[in-house]
Image: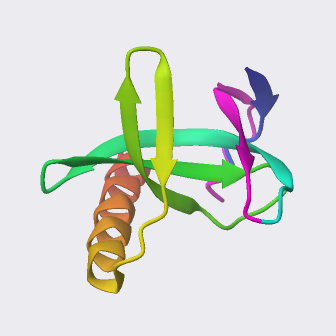
Amino acid sequence: MSEKQCGCGCEHGEEMELETMHLTLDDDTEVECAILGVFEVEGKEYIALLPMEQEEVYLYQYKEEGEEISLEVIEDDEEFEKVSSAFYDLYEEDEQE
């Protein structure tokens, strides 16, 4: 785990511990990402990742089988829009609490 600012722009002013994972991109670049959460949309699980030192959130389909985790790119535009909307709805709920 790494200790970083939450990155949500909420100006907490305090540090929080975020679980991280390393993501290998198509060009073989490795990026350390904070795990913002795993959530469900229409029966499938998705994960929201925030690359360290960036503000753009990555969304992937998430599958966990035993200790094996796999991430799949969301290629369908309609599916991506639903997942994005669900993530931002969850994010807004957290901001209001």
Relative to 94, 40 lies left or right: left
Relative to 55, 86 lies left or right: left
Q: Nearer the viewer, residue 28 or 83?
A: 28
How far across and down, in percent of the image, does residue 59 sit?
49, 60
State the residue at coordinates (38%, 15%): 66
**Which residue is most to the bottom?**
77
- Establish if 68 lies above or below 33: above
Relative to 66, 36 lies left or right: right
Region of the chain picked out in magenta, as a range: 8-26
Q: Quadrant of residue 23?
A: top right
Q: Nearer the viewer, residue 57 or 89?
A: 57
Q: Quadrant of residue 53?
A: bottom right
Assess whether residue 92 is covered by the magenta stretch.
no
- Establish if 29 lies above or below 16: below
State the residue at coordinates (38%, 70%): 84
* Quadrant in the picture for the C terminus: top left
State the residue at coordinates (41%, 55%): 91
How far across and down, in percent of the image, does residue 26 sit?
73, 64
How far across and down, in percent of the image, does residue 18 sit?
65, 29
Assess whether residue 25 is covered by the magenta stretch.
yes
How far across and down, in percent of the image, does residue 1 sit?
73, 20
**Which residue is most to the left?**
42
The mark total stands at 0
Relative to 97, 53 lies left or right: right
